Amino acid sequence: MCRVLEVSRAGYYAWRDRKPSRRASVDVELLVAIKAAHQRSRTCYGSPRIHAELASTGIACGRKRIARIMRRHGIVGKKRRQFRIATTDSRHAYMVAPNLLARQFDSAITARNGAWVGDITAVPTFEGWLYLAVVLDLRSREVIGWSMNPTRDALIVIDALGMAIVRRGVSPSTIFHSDRGSQYACGAFQTMLSAHRITCSMSRKGDCWDNAVAESFFATLKLELADGAHFKTRVVAQAAIFEYIEVWYNRQRRHSAIGNVSPAEFDRADQAT
């Protein structure tokens, strides 16, 4: 081998017996920490969130270095796919509210309970669809209300809003934004909003970007929870969704829109200031 590579025997033995450099040794230690953080994230995090996770434990390291180590060892976060089930029925005779939110999604300019966003999605099971309605606080991105039901009617969004009101209360300026589906436009839901003095806002027709925060949450949930798989039963799906929202997403998962902390942590800090 030395003859072919034109390397002296002494040079080969010196290379073989040489101790790893300080940087290489640190990379090995970082790799162990990165793998542990990646597992804690349910293999969801990419390098930005892994960097935030390590920083929170006192490990100081540049994000580019973490990204390089992850690439070298094939450690990757989950990436979103283009997958959407249409759950909006806007062909109805109900009144439609104006788009008051107007895509003002920046949490930095939104007060706590200043704006809530809601939406419905369909989760596949071998028993049929399970529908999930959520309410998110735009400031903290926390899921403050949710409801699950085999049918996609007004009751599912009324229950989700009811949970949000019980958990958070409302402020005089609270806006609730959704698409213009019949579940949100119907008299029962609008009466509930009026009873709690919540101002209604709705997306423009056929424009999912007007409710991008809720759409983004559902895309994240489907990627990280099921990743295209079907649940055996609705009961199994309900248990998994409950655990994802209340244990993982709200209290542990780092959110890039609020400084790579969890929604619950952001909300606690927000109330403390």
Image: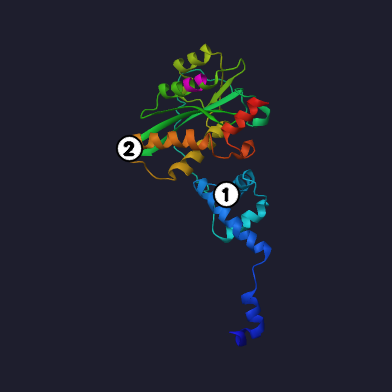
- On-image quarter of the C terminus: top right
Q: Residue 91 is drawn in which quadrant? A: top left
151 horizontally vs 140: left or right: left
Q: Nearer the viewer, residue 15 or 70?
A: 15
Above-or-below relation of 265 to 173: below
Task: List the residue tagged with mark 2.
Answer: 233
Q: Which three-letter amino acid code belongs to the residue tagged 1?
A: Gly
Task: List the residue tagged with mark 1.
Answer: 46
Question: Can you see residue 104?
Answer: no
183 horizontally vs 3: left or right: left
State yes or no: residue 58 in magenta.
no
Please provide percent x and percent y for residue 215.
52, 35
Q: Residues within 10 Å of mark 1 (few under 14, many from 20)?
A: some
Please provide percent x and percent y for residue 166.
50, 19
User: Which region shows up in magenta?
Assistant: 162-166
Question: Alpha carbon of mark 2 to alpha carbon of mark 1: how far?
Answer: 31 Å
Please provide percent x and percent y for residue 261.
61, 38
Above-or-below relation of 5 to 128: below
In the displayed image of the protein, which residue is found farthest to the left? Answer: 127
Helix, strand or loop status at disc 1:
loop
Please provide percent x and percent y for residue 170.
57, 17
In the displayed image of the protein, which residue is found farthest to the top? Answer: 195
19 horizontally vs 84: left or right: right
